[in-house]
Amino acid sequence: MNTRPEYDFIIVGAGSAGCVLANRLSADPKNKVLLLEAGPEDRNLWIHIPLGYGKNLTNRAVNWCFDSVAEAHANGRIDYLARGKVLGGSSSINGMVYMRGQRQDYDLWAQMGCRGWSYEEVLPYFRKAENNARGPNEFHGVGGPLQVSDLRDKPPILNAFLKAGQEAGMPLNADFNGAQQEGIGLTQTTTANGRRNSAAQAYLKPARGRPNLRVETGARGQRALFEGRRVVGYAYIQNGQAIQARAAREVIFSGGAYGSPQLLELSGVGDAGRLKAIGIEPTHHLPGVGEGLQDHQVFRMKWRLKGKPGTYNERTRGLTALGEGLKYIFARRGVLTSPTNPINAFFRTRPELETPDVQIQLFPGTYNSMRDRALHKEPGVTLGPTLLRAESRGSVHARSADPFADPLIHTNVLGTDNDLRTAILAMRYCRRVMETEAMRAYYDFEMAPGKDVQSDDEFAAYAREAGSSNWHPASSCRMGPDGDAKAVVDAALRVRGLEGLRVVDASVMPAVVCGNTNAPTIMIAEKAADLMLAA
Ligand SMILES: Cc1cc2nc3c(=O)[nH]c(=O)nc-3n(C[C@H](O)[C@H](O)[C@H](O)COP(=O)(O)OP(=O)(O)OC[C@H]3O[C@@H](n4cnc5c(N)ncnc54)[C@H](O)[C@@H]3O)c2cc1C
């Protein structure tokens, strides 16, 4: 057994949240901080070139590439669940869409008993985190570590689609993270000067030189070390060696919505009966661990286009690709600077709803499947109508006592009739947008589901065949007040019933926000760091 010197804070998981914590906690030279990450350094070239996203979507060197269980409401299909396994975590492989969700999301958290998490209370942390290229205003900040930029590449298809959305009834929205979310508009991205700005680049890189911060990669979390009810250290495995480190103040799990429930259960924290059944000695009975997993469910549709829309398909092959490569190298411009979804749209499937319940993500390209992402030759677009408030909740649990075993993930996609109904309305609306006058110059034909699909039953069948996770898992270690038996952490993100252990990442969201989850996770970690430093 190897031991390390004593630290003040030990953070397990160097993803969106873990990198923020490592930076903020080590800013005071008096705090000794250890950051553990199962994956490698973020040296892979495709991490840093935005359109390189597709290359790492199934690359096991930097991606956990999890599978769901066979999902009953999706014809027994196994869903593919990408997750970053590298410094920066999922922020190193994500689509770089900068989105915060709705004001009402955070007000709901506060209403659910999570004091301190209302919109007015979290807005300062969103502003503190960001350096928005548009400058400051009441919603946005400058001078923060996270670089938020406008698109550098705007092919003709973007303009056509913006017009199509308006023709179909959506207002133009210049800032989804401003006064209101509803409408269609261009995406702001977590990029800087045409390069990805992951949490590792934004927060960890500037702190790497600090003598009081130690970062260990290839370090697989094993279990927390207890003295009574208090967590006093952490055991992990690196290069086949068992290592222990003591924590004078706190251990923080930032393994993400799939990782943190597993880290807790491997430490004996979870439902005691479930733990015994898989050979783990319970240390603290906490039945909510891993339950209530929520995600955004997406039902991708594809169209073949004609003419010269400038989609990723035709611009990433042959001589055009060569030109784009040179443009990128010499000017940091062109298609390689693009995020996955340069346009987003938020709309309500029913007029009686107060805020949007569906997000449409435009990917200006087509490919066969998530596991086969080779772009097609001919131009095309993929629209991803995404349920923002899916009712279905799933679960994630350790499969066994083996820290190297993948967790057991049940997404429960389309678990309720209402989710199916919303998916059908969302897909019908996407078809309407694509069939507007504004798209006529480019519209060739609908590839998937295809025009044979017309009735609700046919759309439902397609939803079951095509519905999948949009890789925004959350709420598997959710925060809640004392009376809430299924809450895992309190409003200060301390694991209930224990001392010296917090969970800080997307898993603590009481309910998933109505938008992409990277910026909200970074906000959570910014606020958590303040709470820890004040403690
Ligand atoms: C393909 C993809 C595309 C996405 N696109 C977007 C987007 O465009 N915009 C957006 O806002 N959000 C997007 N997201 C979601 C967003 O990136 C995540 O919600 C966010 O990064 C979650 O942060 P986290 O800190 O909770 O977890 P993560 O960033 O996943 O970090 C968890 C870290 O813990 C490590 N870890 C886990 N288990 C262990 C262990 N046992 N031992 C040691 N280390 C461990 C992991 O390797 C990882 O580095 C996307 C996600 C994916 C996967």
Image: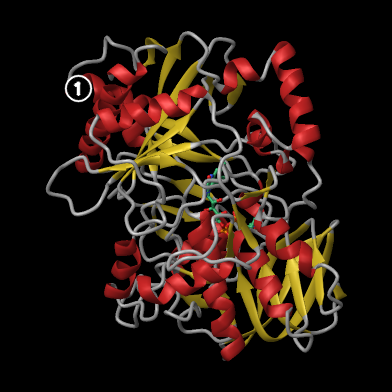
Relative placement, left or right, of 139 versus 58 is left
Helix, strand or loop at label 1? It is helix
Relative placement, left or right, of 242 versus 21 is right
Q: Nearer the viewer, residue 495 or 298?
A: 298
Q: Residue at x 47, y 33 (%)?
A: 78
Residue 374 shows up from this direction: yes
Q: Is label 1 within 8 A of ligand 1 (CB to nearest ligand atom)?
A: no
Q: Nearer the viewer, residue 297 or 28?
A: 28
The N terminus lies in quadrant: bottom right
Residue 300 shows up from this direction: no
On the image, numbered disc 1 is attached to which residue? 457
Crowdedness near tag 1: few (<14), some (14–19) or many (≥20) residues, C-alpha within 10 Å: few
Residue 481, x across and y down, in percent: 34, 80
Residue 49, x across and y down, in percent: 71, 38
Q: Nearer the viewer, residue 156 or 61?
A: 156
Residue 148, x across and y down, in percent: 58, 54
Q: Nearer the viewer, residue 198 or 3?
A: 198
Q: Residue at x 78, y 77 (%)?
A: 245
Q: Residue at x 53, y 66 (%)?
A: 141
Q: Residue furthest left?
A: 352
Q: Residue at x 40, y 77 (%)?
A: 121
Relative placement, left or right, of 239 versus 394 is right
Question: Residue 311 appears in which quarter of the rendering?
Answer: top right
Q: In this rendering, is residue 260 above or below 336?
A: below
Q: In this rendering, is residue 211 above or below 319?
A: below
The C terminus lies in quadrant: bottom right
Q: In this rendering, is residue 425 above or below 106?
A: above
Question: Residue 220 appears in which quarter of the rendering?
Answer: bottom right
